[in-house]
Structures are given as structure tokens and as C-alpha cells.
Amino acid sequence: MSIQWAAECAAVIPCFNESRAIGELVQRVRQHLTEVIVVDDGSTDRTAEVAKNAGAIVLRHAKRRGKGAALQTAWRHAHESGFSWALNLDGDGQHDASDIPFFLQSAESTGAPLMIGNRMERPGEMPLIRRLVNRWMSRRLSRIAGRFLPDSQCGFRLMNLRAWSGLSISSSHFEIESEVLLAFTLASHRVEFVPVRTIYRREQSKINPVQDTIRWLCWWRKACRLQGKRGVPVGNLGQPVPIASPADVTR
């Protein structure tokens, strides 16, 4: 399978107060993909300005709505713009853009609609608490998915937008990674993992360890309960997160 990536794939980057990292990240990503969509999720710094100056298409939420909501806005925009694929990266510069070709090669060689970065082949690079939490969550997702998922929380992903559009995704915060992975798996879509390097800097994580853990556990309980009901895919965990209206998203 040969894919014209420049025409068919847009890079997608959700951001909240990432003015220090976003400019360089956009420039590095554009060495591999022409279209970069940055969703500024209510930042109070110069994220939108820096991203635009670096060559990105910038969509902006007037108020902070969460990583999941920002991703959904970007995916909808890419899909409606005619792109077939979205390459997702975090806006803090944690993902190495030089790994992008490995995702593209994996998609072409396997035909899988979802490729996920796997940091666990070199877990020593991860802070200990993140490593432990990732393994704990990945074990539980593997159990319900019925297959081994080595790194369920990595936000560095390549996703087919046609496959995504057939799922009902409801998360608006950091649990989005778990929900998308499980929704693809339980819809019998092939999922592949791509070894990646992650760059950990001293910047404070945007994850709230208490609030976001509670959100994930609430999502997890719904996933387990609905999976127990025959014929109900895990993606249907509630109403899909509202895509921001034109009044809420600016360019």
C-alpha cells in the first residue's frame, strides 16, 4: 500500500501554554508532513502566535476544554479538510519528530488504521511514577481488550480518520488515549505499536495526578460495565464530546 502522506496526513498537536516548545516542534514536524494543525486549548501565553509563525494552522478554544476536546476539534477539522490520516503529538516537545517516518512505514506495511508509540522498550527514560502508572493502566486495558497493549498512554499516534469517524468517542481529557485505543481494538481494527523515544524535560506535566486519575477511573468503570453488555462497543461511553462551534474556535 502506497500512501501520499503529504496530501493525506495532517499532524495534530493539542496545546495548553506551550509557547516555549511549540515553535520548534512545528518546524520539526513540517520536515515530514506539510499540514500541522495546532489546537490552542485556551492558553494564556503566546502559544497560538508562536505556532502560527512556525507555519501551523491554528485553531483556538476560547476557554480550556481539555486535551481530548482539543484532539477532537483537530480530528474533525482534518477530516472535513479531506485528510485521511492524523498524526498526533503532544505540544510540549516530548515526542521526537524524527520518529515520524517509522509510523508512516508501519501504516504502509501493516495496513493498520492505528499506530501507537511504544516507550516501554526503553522504559528507563521515563520517570518512575509515569512508568508505573502506564504499566498499571496498560494491564487493565489489555485485560478488557483481550490482547497485550504495551503502552496504552502514549499520545504519539497515527490514526486513520475514516476508522475514527465510525466510532463514538466521548472523552474530553487525558483519558482520550485509553478510550480511542480500546474503541479501535473492540471494533476489530488492527492496532500496531511503534518503538519511539520520548524526551523528558523539566517542564511540569499538564496532568493533574488526582483529578485526572479520578476521571480515568470513572471512564474505566463505564468501559467495564458497557463491555459487559453484549453488542455495545466501548467507544459509546456517553454522548460524544461536543465539537466546538465556530463561535468557540478561532483561527
Image (cartoon, grey):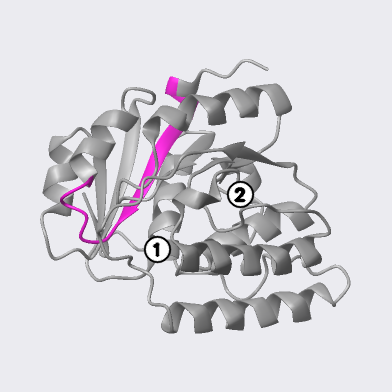
Instruction: Name which residue lies at 33% across and 67% down.
Output: 206
Q: How far apart are marks 1 and 2 (CA)?
A: 17 Å
**Vertical arrangement, residue 92 with respect to residue 5, above or below:** below
Residue reaching furthest front?
124
Tell me the kind of residue under disc 1: Lys
Q: Position of residue 98 (x, y in %)?
A: 40, 28
Tell me the kind of residue under disc 2: Trp
Q: How many labels does the image show?
A: 2
Instruction: Name which residue lies at 30% across and 46% down.
Output: 38
**Vertical arrangement, residue 76 with respect to residue 205, above or below:** above
Q: Name the residue under label 2.
A: 164
Q: Position of residue 46 (x, y in %)?
A: 10, 54
Instruction: Name which residue lies at 17% across and 50% down.
Output: 48
Looking at the picture, tell me which residue is in the foreground, 129 or 250: 129
- On the image, which quarter does residue 11 sit in? top left
User: Which element carries disc 1, helix, strand or loop?
Assistant: helix
Disc nearest the viewer among 1 and 2:
1
The question of residue 12 being in magenta is answered with yes
The mark that comes first in sequence, 1 or 2, is 1
**Vertical arrangement, residue 40 with respect to residue 96, above or below:** below
The question of residue 164 being in magenta is answered with no
Relative placement, left or right, of 55 versus 49 is: right
For the residue carrying disc 1, how many other residues have a C-alpha within 10 Å: few (<14), some (14-19), or many (20+)?
many
Do we see residue 169 in this rendering? no
Task: Write down the region rendered in magenta.
Answer: 6-21
Q: Name the residue under label 1.
A: 67
Relative placement, left or right, of 149 versus 208 is: right
Q: Position of residue 202 (x, y in %)?
A: 25, 58
**Vertical arrangement, residue 205 with respect to residue 118, above or below:** below
Relative placement, left or right, of 118 versus 15 is: right
Kindly indicate whether the residue at mark 2 contacts the one at mark 1 (C-beta within 8 angstroms).
no
